Structure formats: C-alpha cells, structure tokens
Image (cartoon, helix red, strand yellow):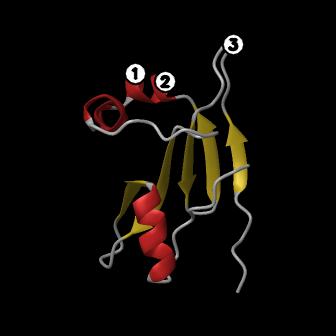
Amino acid sequence: MSTPTPEIYVFQSPGMRPDVRLTIFDTEFHVHRVILALRSRFFQKAFVFGGRKPTPGIWEYEFVSRVDDDGTWGLNLVTPEVCMASAVLQLPLYCMRSQ
C-alpha cells in the first residue's frame, strides 16, 4: 500500500523562508516558526521552552498529526528517534525528510 502524496500549502513572508513542516492528515503546511509562536501557546512552548534544539536540514521542526484510540487527535513533534521507532514498529507516521 503506497502512502498518499500530501497536498502542500506554503506560507511565505518577505525575508522569511518556511522552516517548519506540519503534516496534518493528508495536508502539508510549510510555515515559519516565528509566526506560529506569535499566535499559539502550543508552538511557543514547543520552540522556546521545549528544550529541544532545531534539527539541521531543510526543516528545523516537523510536526505530524496523530489520532488516538478515542478518535481525538493532536500534533507530535517529529524527532529522529520517533521516526526510527515508527519504522521498526511499522507505525503509520510520516517521517520522510525533503532533500
């Protein structure tokens, strides 16, 4: 079974390239962390108080949606460890990095 190609929306502002990728179900958003942190306490904590340094590469931060057993959903910060574990356990987590 192949993974569907997500629909992609890119949000840009003069002088700021997108540095965060949000994959929410089958839709991908490319945004800048400064804008997210200004408008959301969730992202402010993830970027400022999370104690995690950005991963070098195209995306400094990546988040993917996750649906719980009870049907609720949320965003998970993607780290190399999460991607490795999801591959080993064959979990449906989108962890591919753009080249």
Q: Is residue 74 visible?
A: yes
For mark 2, does the 10 Å Cα neighbourhood hold few (<14), some (14 to 19), or many (20 or more) residues?
Answer: few
Residue 20 at x, y percent in the picture: 55, 38
Number of the label disc, if any, that sits on residue 35: 2
Residue 68 at x, y percent in the picture: 34, 72
Using the image as rendered, state which of residue 30 and residue 61 is in the foreground: 61
Q: Residue at left 37%, top 36%?
A: 43
Q: Could you tell whether 15 is left or right of 35 in the image? A: right
Q: Quadrant of residue 46?
A: top left
For mark 1, does the 10 Å Cα neighbourhood hold few (<14), some (14 to 19), or many (20 or more) residues?
Answer: few
Residue 29 at x, y percent in the picture: 62, 44
Using the image as rendered, state which of residue 42 and residue 81 is in the foreground: 81
Q: Say which label, 3 or 1, has the lower sequence index.
A: 3
- Look at the numbered discs 2 and 1 and tell me whether their residues touch, using CB distance below 8 Å: yes
Q: Residue at left 68%, top 25%?
A: 12
Q: Could you tell whether 34 is left or right of 97 in the image? A: left
Q: Secondary structure at mark 3?
A: loop
Number of the label disc, if any, that sits on residue 38: 1
Q: Secondary structure at mark 2?
A: helix
- Amino acid type indicated by mark 1: Leu
Extreme residue toward the top, this view: 15
Residue hosting label 3: 14
Q: Quadrant of residue 97?
A: bottom right
Q: Residue at left 45%, top 30%?
A: 36
- Amino acid type indicated by mark 2: Ile
For mark 3, does the 10 Å Cα neighbourhood hold few (<14), some (14 to 19), or many (20 or more) residues?
Answer: few
- Look at the numbered discs 3 and 1 and tell me whether their residues touch, using CB distance below 8 Å: no
